[in-house]
Amino acid sequence: MNAFLLASEGGHAAANPSWPLLSFLVLTPVVGALVVAMVSKRRPELAKQAAVLFSLVTGALAIGVVVLFKKHVPGFQLVDDVQWLKNPDISWKLGVDGISLWMVALTGILFPIAMLGAPPHDEEKSFYAWLLVLEAGCLGAFLALDTFLFFVFFEIVLVPMYFLISGWGYGERKYAATKFFLYTMFGSAFMLVGTVALSYLHAKGGPVTFDLQTLANEQGVLAQGTARWLFISFAIAFAVKVPIFPVHTWLPDAHTQAPTAGSVILAGVMLKLGTYGFLRFGLYLFPEASAWAAPVMVTLGVIGIIYGAICATMQKDLKRLVAYSSVAHMGFIVLGIFAITRQALDGSVLQMVNHGVSTGALFLLVGFIYERRHTREIAELKGLQKPAPKMAAVFTLVMLSSIGLPGLNGFVGEFLILIGSFLTVRWWAVVAVVGVILAALYLLWAYQRVFHGEPDEANKSFKDINFTEGLVMAPLLFLIVFMGLFPKPFLERIEPSVIKLVHHVEANSDHREPSVSTRGDEVVPESERRSEADATAEGEHGTGHGDEHGSEEGE
Amino acid sequence: MMLAEVERLATPQVAWSVLLPVLILLGGAVVLMVAGALTPRRTKYPWHAGFTVAVAVGAMVSTVFLWWRVRDDGPISAVADAVVVDGLSLYLGFAILCSVVLAALLTHGYLQRERLEGADAYVLMLLSAAGGLVMAGANDLLVLFLGLEILSIAVYVLAGIHVRRARSGEAALKYFVLGAFSSAFFLYGIAMVYGATGSTNFTKIGAFLATNVLTNNVMLLAGFALLLVGLGFKVAAVPFHAWTPDVYEGSPSPIVAYMASGVKVAGFAGLIRVFTYTFSTYATDWQPMIYALAVATLVVGSLFAVSQTNVKRMLAYSSISHAGFILLGIQAASTQGTRAALFYLATYTFMAAGSFGVVTIVGRTGDNAHDLSAYNGLAKRSPLLAFAFLVFLLGQAGVPFTSGFLAKFGVIGAAVEARSFWLALIAMLTSVISAFVYLRIVLAMYDRDTEVTGPKLRVPLGARAAIIIALVVTIGVGLVPEPLAHVTRTAVALTHPQPAPAAAPIEVSAGS
């Protein structure tokens, strides 16, 4: 326990940078957007250069955050805190921990890639300006330590994405953009009421605060039932964003109609706002309610895995296929989050990064194909391997990473999620494994139809990947291999925060993590090491639980 | 000697200085009317509008001075306690004056375009604003009624100021007939409350209700209901909203800018003064009424907007749903609720005036191009105008970093604090429906497939200034809300405190 406390205090002590790095990180793209918006309309290339420059600077700052991040410290680091409104107390409070760190890094890396890899055909200026606004919004949402501020960023990202889809998308773009906006706003409506209600109920007539840490650490102020209702209000918003099974229908439309850069960011970064939300504003803010809702969430996650995979298999449109594969992958992450074990949470956070990298890369590749052939119909593509062997190789690697081949990044995340969820929700994990097999099915089958065989007339002159495209793909390919072979630098930064989160949930609910941990003993607090009998009892409880629901599912 | 004493009894002491904002407006209106009648209608320089703006700004300055005085010395009651100068009256009076400035700036270009030049519109606007200020400062039901009528009659005429447009006349007639009807309800309500409490003075009513328990309060409750009808009509709360879409559609667009902002603020000034302050001891009785009214207003305002194809009608319904949001703050019946309502009113004034400013320009000569298709490709024709409208629409939808977001946030906070969770949730869900309506307009404006046709839109200088002011305020308050939030806090703090809830009734009176 002491080690745990010390570590957490260390986290607060470390939170004192000499200059507000995180604020710079969020504000750089904003400045960039303003600069781009002011560039003359007749010089579109200048707009692009400025936008890429600003996104690269932001990326560099994000890497800077990773470098400055102290790895064995679980609390929030590099905290910036400026009061925005006095009463109620709302602050511009940013901070990073092991969970948000990689989201920030992912955002910093994916934006320049999306900009370089998928330039628009017209109206460059506003396109890049919106992308930069989007980047600021995403970074802000990942870093916000104030529930109000988080809501602001969570909501503001809708606007640029709406314009990106409706302005530069394909055929049904207006329908898709409106659907996307309204679905997400529908979720946010619940969240705003939840956010406000949480703070006012928490205040109990005293000063109202929106400070995340205060609200999360002062558990027990709210009645159990109230906290559960509030959790539901947040969960609806995140479920729409992730998206979780019954509210996922906006995603295939939005992804398919969005321009390539939009799809990359939507899948790579924006969906993570939902799962990140579950971690930060679900487990952390409402530990008891999260543990209470876990069976439902886990079930929905597994349904998403299977349903997404089946839908993906049936798709005729390559981009729609990748979109549905996102539903499946996000289902894995939700399963991992609500299994609430260390391994599963580690896996979920890592898988959030993995999914961003692999699905981002897949969307880019689909975009490259569309640029050349002006179609995404799988039936119209054939034998691309012959004219474009390099692209086939890149596609293979990315696809295998998405399937979860050992040695590549997807494997590490999915494996950890499956191990972790096997401990608490055994049968769900077993069903989820089927999803991995299905992923292999739909992706390999799609690959086979698109790349194998003899190319027909239309596909004969298909151009191979060019230098710029290769340059854009290179960092993603590097990450796919590096994270697959050597995930340690990632995990050792994620783990302390995850452990802290699990303890936070255990301290405030009946949930107990089965004690089978083999790694990271140096940071495991005393309370974690329970007696053998206790652990067995927990394990049996978990299994019984699983059996019960498993049989229900069987019926 | 005798004579002097009688005189003193007959006329109460009038502290003219505290009535200065109203007097400036009335004086300005009279001067403008006379000068306008003596000079040609078409003038080389836009001095009609300029004079109106100057008068309104003069009234603002005097308001600011009064604000400082009230801040130092506390609320001032004047004219035998029939008028009160306090935080609430000055704050809302200032908001009304802001809407006069914006509307006057918009009106100039409009009148020129429609060949309707003349001082009459401005005179009426100033008179109506004077009525609004009287409403905001009323401390007596009859003075409130007086203000309401001064405000309304001028606006009825304003609605029909476009003499060559049949719709304008229709709107004026509709507004007048229904408005007169609602005034009758209001008067009847005054009579009821007077019957129940024995006074029309807010201070006395409040004190009476705080210290007495009525054995039979039917008359009082009926009075509440009737007053609510009268004021609900002015703020366009459902089910008293039926006039709104027709009148908004038919009236000249810059006048609608004034109606949606200034008139609404005045109506809410009355609601806040009467219900939140005077009848605070009976909050448990009127809160359910407002609750039901708010739900109906939110739902009808957002749902009916969806099926509209006319942008003016869309905005009319959206202004109804905004009234529903402000009712949330009143329903809370708390300091926080009043603050939130004040914040909302100020921000909505600018968003509404700005929106209708854009509508004025896009409407073109004849003020008829209000179909959604008229907005197709607006971003290509006039990018800045489209951007301004975008900000106003997103602000009304409640998107962060606009003032509208914080306004919504405030009233939701107040509702939640008052434990009206369902009301807050309904409000947010209906705001999603409203967002769909705004998005339709945005989609049309930013539609890149439409060919740009027709002549270029001319944005007159005055309208440009008005839109820029509204834009700056909408974004500025969205980014730096603390100053306005501080002012609303002060305004509530500088208002006569609400009588304490009837915890310990002293006498029991037989009521009626």
Image (cartoon, rainbow, N blue to C red):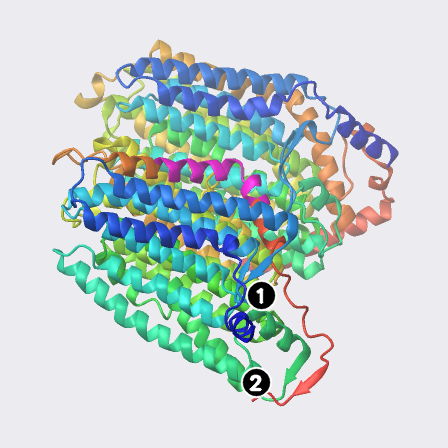
What is the x, y in percent for residue B186? 41, 74
Magenta segment's dominant SS is: helix
Q: Residue A484 carries which label?
A: none
* Residue B341 visible to an observer of this rendering: no
Q: Which of marks 2 and 1 is nearer the N terminus?
A: 2
The quadrant in which the C terminus of chain B is found is bottom right
Q: Mark 2 points at which residue?
A: B217
Most foreground residue, A291 or A384: A291
What is the x, y in percent for residue B336? 60, 55
Q: What element carries label 1?
A: helix
Label 1 amino acid? Tyr
Position of B422 compared to B444: left or right?
A: right
Q: In this view, does B492 lie above or below A138?
A: below
Label 2 amino acid? Asn
Kindly identify which chain the residue marked by label 2 belongs to: B
Q: Is mark 2 on a helix, strand or loop?
A: loop
Position of A279 compared to A540: left or right?
A: left
Q: Name the residue under label 1.
A: B277
Asked whether residue B195 is drawn in magenta, I would say no
Most foreground residue, B373 or B94: B94
Kindly identify which chain the residue marked by label 1 belongs to: B
Residue at image point 33% right, 21% down: A119
Q: Is residue B503 above or below residue A68?
A: below
> Which residues lie in the magenta part?
B468-486
Q: How far apart are marks 2 and 1 (CA)?
A: 19 Å
